[in-house]
Amino acid sequence: MGSAGVSLFRGRGWAQAGIGPQIRGGGLRDGFVYDAQAGARVFGGVLVLFNLRGVQPWDTEPGDASTISPAGFGDGVTCLAYGPGLVVELARGVSLQVDLDGVTHVRNIAKGPTLRFGLSVSR
């Protein structure tokens, strides 16, 4: 996947975007994935961000295994997920990230909100 980004607001914000191929094989439809994120440090160790991610098949012809694709992307429909996020610095080098994404415009997989969280540690 190739991506590019830029610093905004004198280093208090950022934006990045990426795109690349999704080669699955095994009778599943190939396509491309894309993502974008923009955010800013609102105060202290708190960052607010917005995420966008998706998958788009190359074509809409049925694949050999499109009806049993566990990922649900085998039917020629874009999968699009987007929503806000928050990163809170808990201690020096330790942060908690929480994202709330809404998955839309899909078939064969659940639509609706997804809550994700992660802990990052760096030194």
Image (spheres, rainbow, N blue to C red):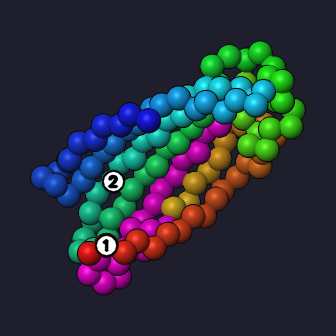
Residue, disc 1: 122
Q: Is residue 119 left or right of residue 79?
A: left
Nearer to the camera, 19 or 9 = 19
The kind of residue tagged 2 is Gly
**Which span is picked out in magenta?**
79-98
Check disc 1: other Cα within 10 Å, few if <14, some if 14-19, many if 20+.
few
Above or below for 94 versus 24: below
Residue, disc 2: 39
Report the residue at 33% width, 65% height from top.
47
Task: Report if residue 85 lies within the magenta region.
Answer: yes
The kind of residue tagged 1 is Ser
Residue 104, percent from left and from top: 67, 42
User: How many numbered callouts?
Assistant: 2
Q: Is residue 78 visible?
A: no
Residue 44, percent from left and from top: 23, 74
- Label 1, secondary structure: give it: loop
